[in-house]
Image (cartoon, rainbow, N blue to C red):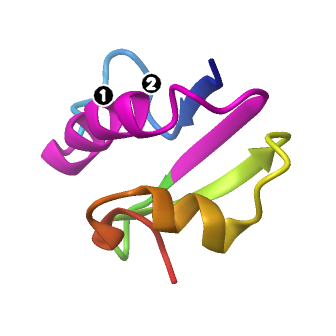
Amino acid sequence: MAILRFDGFLPNEETPEEFELFRKVSSECFKKLEGDLTFYFVESYKRFDIKTNTTGKNYTEIRNMLDDYSYLLM
C-alpha cells in the first residue's frame, strides 16, 4: 500500500472541504500502489499537486487512477 502524505495545513488550521474529500478518495484509489506519494494543496486553485512520488507511476498515470480528475492540477 502506498504511503500517502498531505502537506499544507497545520493541525490548528481549518482545512477546506476539498482537502478532506481528497484524502478519502486518494486512500481508496492508491491503495494498490507501492511507494510514497506526498500531495500539497494549492489554495489558489483549490486542487492538489504532487510533491513527492516514488511509486514508479508518472503524473498522468496517477491522475488517471482517480475517478474525478478535478482533484489534481493539470
Which residue sits at x=50%, y=40%? 8
Which residue sits at x=63%, y=65%? 61
Label 2 CA crowd tier, 10 Å (few <14, some 14–19, many 20+)? few
Q: How far apart are marks 1 and 2 (CA)?
A: 5 Å
Q: Is residue 32 above or below residue 41?
A: above
Residue with the mark numbered 1: 13
Name which residue type carries label 1. Glu
Name which residue type carries label 2. Leu
Q: Where is residue 44 in the image (x, y as percent from the top left)?
A: 37, 74
| Quarter residue 16 falls in | top left
Quadrant position of the N terminus in the picture: top right
Which residue sits at x=78%, y=45%? 52
Q: In this view, does 26 lie to the left or right of 70?
A: right
Q: Is mark 2 on a helix, strand or loop?
A: loop
Q: In this view, does 9 lie to the left or right of 21?
A: right
Residue 36 is one of the magenta-drawn residues: yes
The dot on residue 10 is: 2
Q: Disc 1, disc 2: CB below 8 Å?
A: yes
Read off the magenta span.
16-40
| Quarter residue 57 falls in | bottom right
Q: Is residue 73 above or below residue 48?
A: below
Q: Is residue 54 above or below residue 3?
A: below
Q: Where is residue 30 in the image (x, y as percent from the top left)?
A: 51, 36
Residue 68 is one of the magenta-drawn residues: no
